[in-house]
Amino acid sequence: MHTGKRQRRLGLLLARQDKTITIASLEVPGGLRPSLVVWLLGLTQIIGYGTLYYSFAILAGDAAKDFGWSVSALFASLSVGLLAGGVIAHEVGKRIDRHGAGVVMAVGSVLSAAALLLVSLAPNGPIFAIAIVATQIISSLVLYDAAFAALVQATGVEARLRITHLTLIAGFASTIFWPMTSWLHGIVGWREIYAGFAALNLFVCLPLHALLIGQTHHHAAVAREVQASTKAPAARPSRYLLWMVTAAFALSGFALSAVLSQMVPMLTALGIGGSAVLVSALFGPAQVLVRFVNMLVGNRRHPVFAALIALALVPAALGVLAWSAPLAIGAVVFALMVGFGSGLKSVVQGTLPLALFGSSGYGARLGFMASFRQVLAALAPFALALLIDGVGAPLAVAGITLVGVLGFAAMVAVAFAHAALERDGQRAADSAKPAPK
């Protein structure tokens, strides 16, 4: 039964001298049903990814012609923006924990609209490049990590399932915005398109994010009060476990970013030829399919199992490609496996930290991980291009595969550490039971 002011239980992690962790279930009022929160965020994620990221590849060519720049120079500004966004991600996460994700995302919507408007009005190449850098910095305030934190704050113990739902919806961003941007590009110029995208962020995303301010800000306030009311500081996760999770996602993200940025040229260099573009088109549907499967069965197991699968798929896919090239069927299997790995990875990057470390400090923790992940992902396309030019496509693929294997190995270490903690917890629980009379 649903009422206007529902009471929702949120599990907040507390600590006692960094030794014993307990769960305090608190009643937190919320006016929006979790399913509605997911759909609202799903719409803003589609618009956010579509306007701030996916549209650039289609519109950059015309902008470069107008300014007399090379397309690669404009893409360099995108990479710089991704690097800068990674640098500030941890600080953004702290603000999300302090003020609530709704506040941060609403501010991000206003700034996104301003940055996109600046892109549309840029009088020359340098201003355009600066505006593109700004869009990527601001994206840290409105895209996945912020949205995951918003779900944790707004839906509480349902957050893990809701994150899966959100990634399924947001997976259609490229499916919607690539053809829509191309269609618009045949009617109006790139400046008008970017101005329209600015309006979408201001008049659609801003009101939707504003609806979440009450719920997410209340969670942040409750978390601060709970921490202040305890004599001991909030629980800090194991540094080893945190660093290993961060390394696993960052290394795997490097390999995945390298592959996605150079997929068509890499397939062509390996002799796939004219079918390279068609094969690459399988990536998007594979992402959506694996997220749907994970939504149906993924919540039955701890997210570390899905993380192991996700991080194994990318190096395995590269191995298939290297072994089978130039056969087209091998390239098809490669594209599907990469899509599966990418789709599943985007889910577990939100659910695994929540399952391992809890909701306390969730935003800052995601930001910490994103800092390393985004920096390496921004460097990956350039690194792979250098490798292909320097040592050839086969050895370049081998090098990227090795990086992916290292990411998987780090996640294996996380799985073993988690299993050890589970065993220790079970022994402690068993020893606390009263002896039979």
Image (cartoon, grey):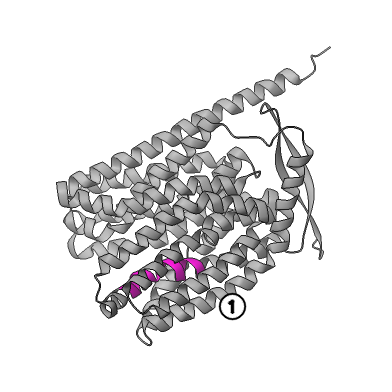
Where's residue 13, x and y in %?
Answer: 69, 39
- Residue ID at (53%, 32%): 239
Residue 309, above or below 388:
above
From the image, tell me which residue sits under label 1.
203
Residue 231 left/right relative to 356: right
Determine which quarter of the picture holds residue 110: bottom right
How many marks are shown on the rendered structure? 1
**In the rendering, at what x and y percent does residue 398 appear?**
24, 42
Q: Is residue 296 visible?
A: no
The front one of 36 and 216 is: 216
| Magenta span of residues | 48-60
How crowded is the residue under tag 1: few (<14 C-alpha within 10 Å), some, or many (20+)? some
The quadrant of the picture occupied by the C terminus is top right
Find residue 243 and report its horizontal and vertical position in percent: 48, 36
Determine the residue positioned at 36% across, 78% down. Answer: 182
Q: Is residue 279 magenta?
A: no
User: Left or right: where does residue 29 sit relative to residue 298?
Assistant: right
Which residue sits at x=34%, y=63%? 77
Q: Residue furthest right?
A: 437
Task: Identify the residue at image location x=40%, y=50%.
Answer: 375
SS of the residue under disc 1: helix
Q: Position of residue 269 (x, y in %)?
A: 17, 56
Residue that lies at the very extreme toward the bottom in this rendered image: 187
* In the image, residue 255 above or below residue 205: above
Residue 72 shows in the view: yes
Residue 433 placement, left or right of 342? right
Left or right of 403 on screen, residue 369: right
Identity, as a three-letter code, of the amino acid under mark 1: Phe
- What secondary structure prevails in the magenta region? helix
- Does residue 306 sit above or below 58 in this rendering? above
In this view, the residue in front, 157 or 209, is 209
Q: Nearer the viewer, residue 138 or 124?
A: 124
